[in-house]
Image (spheres, grey):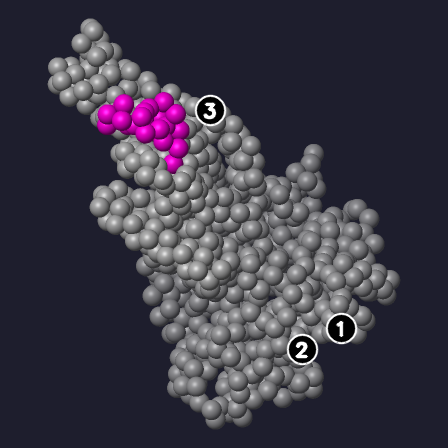
Amino acid sequence: MADGREAGLETLLQDLRYGLRMLAKSQGFTAIAILTLALGIGANTALFSVVNGVLLNPLAYPHSAELVAIYGKTPGYQRAPINYLNFLDWQRQTQAFSSMAMYRNQDYNLIGTGEIAERVRGYMISADFFPTLRVTPVLGRTFRVDDDQVGAAPVVILGGGFWRRKFGASLEITGKSITLNGTSYAIVGVIPAGFTFYGQDRDVYTPIGQWNDASFRDRRVDVSAHAVGRLKPGITLSQAIADMDGIAQNLAAAYPEADKAVGITLVSMKEDLVGNVQPLLIVLLAAVGFLLLIACANVANLLLARSMGRSREFAIRAALGASHIRVIRQLLTESIVLAGLGGAMGLLFAFWGTKAVLGTLPGALPRANEVSLDSRVLFFTIALSLFAGIIFGLAPALKTSRVDLQEILKESGRGLSGARHRLQGVFVAVEVAMALVLLVGAGLMVRSLSALWRVDPGFNPSHAITFSLSLPASPSTNSAETRARLRHFDDKMHSIPGVQAVSVTLGSRPMIHNSSLPFWIEGQPRPANLQEMPQAMFYLVEAGFHQAMGVTLERGRFIAPQDDENAPVVIDIDDIFARTYFPHENPIGKRIHIAGFDVQAEIVGVVGHVKQWGLDADAKSAIEAQFDYPFMQLPEKLMPLAADAVGVVLRTEGDPTAVIDPVRRAVEEIDPREVVYNVQTMDEVVSNSFAARRLSMILLGVFAAFALVLACVGIYGVISYLVGQRTHEIGVRMALGAQRGDVFRLVVVHGARMALLGVVIGIGAALGLTHLMANQLFGVSAHDPLTFAGVALLLIIVAVAACYIPARRAMRVDPMIALRYE
């Protein structure tokens, strides 16, 4: 037994040494084959590393499968923000969760002695937040229940990155204080630097229960808070859903005004984080799979052509007693060595390619920071290389191993005809078919993006810019002071050269932030509860908003400077609001009751609809109707929500980014404690709204371009080889009277037939596969005939072009020389 293993190992080593010598003798062939395989394997490895990091790897928390994202569910939203008082009831009543935590985005102004304010990113969190995620601080402690109460001493936990950047990773930091929004917070702990939540890290964490705002404890008001929970061991998601549904029914019975028809949505945290990117990644993974198969077919063709030149070698080896299995094993060994070298180079391509993709479009993928070439990706590359070696080496090995010595000697160097030529043609047809599928996918994505760019967003993004502005608020800041600060800010902005219009804003901002409110129309019966009321997106705006955004006026008037806190409440509605709720009448002068604000407002204008949810998703949204509400008329009880930070939109004469430095200087002159942050041009906002589509288009386009090149090379290689093999035949034809044009057509027609067969097969495959990307398309059908016809025509033209040089060479064959050679 041991002798048999040693003999087998010795035979394998012999095959390896011989294979390496043969590859070294054909350096040009070896280089082309390795590069072709490296391209296919590298693309597959790069995309698998993304799939692995985004879809396959568990979240970076202990027992992350137990983590569940918890949302409210209302008639307008399946995943709505939650209410603090409802959250407390969920905590008390749940039987399915071992712990549950609430969190809310909250940025702060960090103010030091004699320093300009710095905006820091933060979360308000409940005391169970870090224990639920099972994150242990590197210094100090997490929040206690008594920290998470109104009136408790202000405390803060620092993010690890912020701790290192701002405090030099001082081990003496706990017990010291920092000033956030004018309030001194004692530092009680530091979270590890690598901690992220939903792909982001935070600088500071404060107790949410200390937020002493009336709206926060009103079950009817949405303050953009969310929750996460950890299931008890053994509890399934479906059991947790049943448990929370029962709690929702209890709250609806106890608080019908606020919680009637309010449900609870549960989704695994991983699924919630990954979102809708899974279908996109599956499509792209299938695309690079096709690219690898094209590369394998190309290399198989090269090996088949090369093996024809080695026919005598294998015939003689067979005559000397080598079995078919022995010859097949030798050829497969060479193929696997070739694939291994291609895989090694492919890893380098994957490393560079992954970094390039993530660096170009970092916001297009969730968990992008977790994508890496880890051990699983390395194992995938090894397995893929082995698979590729067997796939592209098997057909040539089987064909070459079964040789006829007499036939080989009779052909006298002309190689084997017939079956081998047909096999090469099949490989080319397969390449063309798969290239067509990729080109159709890329073409559909290009047409989708083209259609998206033609969509009117309802505003003019050109020369418009938006940013956030923090205000130096304190608990004692009143509404009059907040309004005065905003008016002073407006005056300063108008004094900047090049600024045409400016408005502060809250609530919704197109494609950035969504906020809605329930309402009912005056003269109609008031619905029994909030959930039965219709809802509309609302924008808190100043008089310059519509000019700054480039929103059109359809009738009536825009909100004007006189619509201030001393004037009657007015609103502008959009055309969808008008058509939906006032279908056969003029809405100007009509009144609606806005439940969340507890006010009655008169409609003074109808404006164009803004694509709030994105260019491609707006019509699919549950809430389309919109209204604009004067910022200065925000009710007194809600003005504290504007005291900390507001959004701003500016329109400029030239490049909008050129005004940001003057804006920052003007803000510093107003108050050094104010900070400008989150700067984006509106063109960037629109572009970012379909970043995932753009990523898929770019990747599919790159894969399709490579596939087209490989298919072209495959056609050229086969036709060129066949011309060389048929030199004698061509000489005979020309000696018998065939014209050069006849020879040219013969060669071109042969290549065109292979390509046409591939096109027919590819169209059938594409018709079956493009429906998988239907949800990624916009404004074009998955079976768009124009795209299919255009791609088919392109491939046939490319195939004919690839035949041109071999055909020209065939035309120049001298019959006398060809016949003399034979």
The amino acid sitting under disc 1 is Gln
Looking at the picture, tell me which residue is in the foreground, 538 or 374: 374
Query: Label 3's element?
Result: helix
- Say which residue label 3 marks: 760
Looking at the picture, tell me which residue is in the foreground, 18 or 287: 18
- Which numbered disc, 1 or 2, marks the residue that appears first in the sequence? 1
Q: Which residues are magenta?
A: 401-425
Q: Position of residue 682 (x, y in %)?
A: 44, 52
The amino acid sitting under disc 3 is Val
Q: Quadrant of residue 374?
A: bottom left
Q: State how far apart marks 3 and 2 are (Cα).
A: 61 Å
- Which numbered disc, 1 or 3, marks the residue that appears first in the sequence? 1
Query: Label 1's element?
Result: helix
Residue visible at 47% across and 67% down in the picture: 469
Marks 1/2 in contact by CB < 8 Å: the verdict is yes
Q: Position of residue 541 (x, y in %)?
A: 54, 57
Residue 689 — which label? none
- Say which residue label 1 marks: 91
Residue 376 within the segment the image draws in magenta: no
- Say which residue label 2 marks: 128
Closer to the eye: label 3 or 2 = 3
Screen quadrant of the C terminus? top left
Residue 392 in view, yes or no: no
